[in-house]
Amino acid sequence: MKSRFAMLARLSRKASLSLACLFLGLSLAAPSLRASNLDTAARQLADRIASTTGPGSITLEVANRSSLDDKSAKEVRSAIQAELRIKGVHAVAADQSVGSVNVILSESLREFVWTAVIAIGADPPRTVLVSSPRPPAAPFAPAFPLTLKKTLLFSNEQPILDAALIDASGGMLAEGVATIPAGARLLVLEPARVVVYRQQSGHWDLETSLPINVSRVFPRDVRGRLFLRRDHLFDAYLPGAFCRSSSAAPLTMNCARSDDPWPLTSDEIGPNAVRAFYAPARNFFTGALSPGIGKISNAPSFYSAAPLARSNYTLWVLATVDGSIHEIDGVTDQAIRSARSGSDLAAIRSTCGAGTQLLVSESGDSDRDSLRAFEIPDRDPVAVTSPLEFDGTISALWPNAALASAVAIVKRADTGWYEANRITISCAH
């Protein structure tokens, strides 16, 4: 699948425009200006809450889904509570209240957007909101210069959909290993089979080939994913099909037709255990999520998604089929529609910079793609590495189970063969 991050590639080559301009984002400015905006918005929201509730006692909950830090969010809550008290509305425990007020602090690309859902007695809930401009951001400079590295794992004449490295015991290969140890195995997902190779004397020897015996026609641009599991070796997802390996030797695999949603990460429980329905006749996710991301269960159709952990929520970044980037925090879905985004992105963790980076594919020439790493300190992607060039087009980009590296599948421009590359980030000093 051809990357769509063409505009970012042109910006990186010209080196004359900042990525922040491309994404039209704004973040928090000087403390004095920020405080003024927050105080004004807090007073406005308190006015609208009090006008709806009238004097009395309520429970007050404030959830931060914005780029405000914990200290600022607590200050907002205190300001709202103080203003309410002036107007005769007191925040008390639930057993002493006549209603509840749930405030959600969110934001769009240009504004803070604060919403209050008010429920009094048996009356239907009412919603009030206020918005306030976000001041211009101060320039962000990453703490460390970062470098993307690629290691060729495997090349194949047949299409490669995904690949996963495991150690001799079947566990995930430790990160930071300079060379692949003897006995390590490589799982390679192809459209018609899963192939297991074993490392011997510096090369991969075929160990076993497990056919995908599912009666269906895959789309032309077929995609697929491998997930390593604790109670068996792996699961494999393909359009309209699901395969599960055995848990003991000799290794076998059972496949069946399936329209169940695909996991977006290897997490089977927790806030990142989000699944998305894949369009079996196409090459993208429909946007239907199960479970949802917070309160959002339907997103635009997308090619790939990546979770970025925040202090009190997870920000999901989606590369949608219309060429835009969507940022979903569980309450709001913010679209950046002026940029032509890449179709492949993945989050990986490192010991550098912010600790989590977003890999994004960029298209250059018609038959050459590259990868670049970004950080999102607020809601605006900021480039933290130079492009990592490939001798072909990126057809897939998947993170490994621990998010410590990613696998980039590239179709070479000269031979037409497919290559699986391991992508890591290092701290350049």
Image: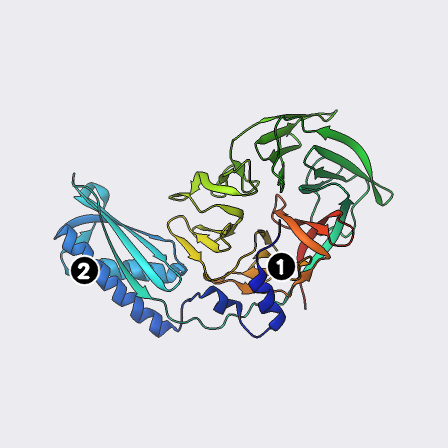
352 over 102 or under it: above or below: below
Front-most of residues 121 and 332: 332
Q: Which mark is residue 271?
A: none
Q: Is residue 164 left or right of residue 378?
A: right
Sequence-first disc among 1 and 2: 2
Front-most of residues 177 and 213: 213
Q: Which mark is residue 47?
A: 2
Q: Is residue 48 left or right of residue 34?
A: left
**Residue density around tag 1, few if under 14, some if 14–19, many if 20 or more, within 10 Å:** many
Residue at the far right in the pictured view: 201
Q: Inspect this view and state whether residue 126 appears.
A: yes
Q: Secondary structure at mark 1?
A: strand
Disc 2 residue type (three-letter): Asp
The quadrant of the rendering that contains the C terminus is bottom right
Residue 148, position in %: x, y? Answer: 67, 60
Q: Residue at x 63, y 70 (%)?
A: 13
Q: Is residue 308 left or right of residue 72?
A: right
Q: Residue at x 25, y 59 (%)?
A: 80
Q: Are marks 1 and 2 in contact (CB under 8 Å)?
A: no
Q: What colour scheme has been applied to the protein in the rendered image? A: rainbow
**Residue for badge 1:** 363
Residue 92, position in %: x, y? Answer: 21, 49
Residue 345, position in %: x, y? Answer: 57, 52
Disc 1 residue type (three-letter): Ser
Q: Secondary structure at mark 2?
A: helix
Residue 179, position in %: x, y? Answer: 79, 50
Question: Which quadrant of the view contains residue 359?
Answer: bottom right
Q: CA distance from mark 1 to mark 2?
A: 50 Å
Q: Residue at x 61, y 47 (%)?
A: 399
Q: Inspect this view and state whether residue 311 appears.
A: no
12 over 397 or under it: above or below: below
Q: Residue at x 64, y 29 (%)?
A: 232
